[in-house]
Image (cartoon, helix red, strand yellow):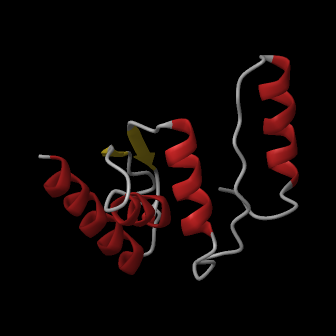
Amino acid sequence: MHPPNDPGFAQLRAKARAWQAPLLSVADRGFWDLGVVPRMLNICRRERVAVWHGHDYKSNALGLLLRRFWPMKLVTTVHGWSTTPRALRSTTRSTASACRATTS
């Protein structure tokens, strides 16, 4: 997932091409872009995803939601504990706890 027209993603795409590594792209227009859900579910089914690795509140929450429709393990890596605003830290902790609870 990446913002539409993100110049950093173009660099990532070039590196993936140079390494002949597969790269799947889902444009994400922000928190309320619910169109991401069916696009990600289609990718999970098509690629037969076994592990969903989230790194932030949205990818963790999406993993929890998509797991209801596609059987996969959930993993989360939490970043930015010291510089993230308090409300987001709380949300991230809650999501990480939910991921642990659903994969135990």
From this view, report whether residue 58 is shown above or below residue 8.
below
Say which of 73 and 83 sits in front. 73
Quick check: 48 above or below 101?
A: above
> What is the quadrant of the N terminus in the image?
bottom right
Taking the image as shown, residue 53 lies to the left or right of residue 11, namely left
Name the quadrant containing residue 73.
top left
Residue plotted at (33% across, 73% down): 91
47 with respect to 90 (left or right): right
Which residue does the image show at 77% across and 27% down from the upper left? 16
Locate residue 65 relative to residue 59 in the image: left or right: left
Report whether 30 appears left or right of 49: right
The residue under the point 55% across, 37% down is 47
Residue 102, position as x, y percentages in the image = 18, 55
* Point 34% across, 56% down: residue: 67
Front residue of 1/40: it is 40
Where does residue 69 sit, x and y in percent of width and height? 37, 60
Give the mark count. 0
In the image, residue 63 lies at what x, y percent? Answer: 40, 57
Q: Residue furthest top?
A: 19
Tell me where residue 75 sits by quadrant.
top left
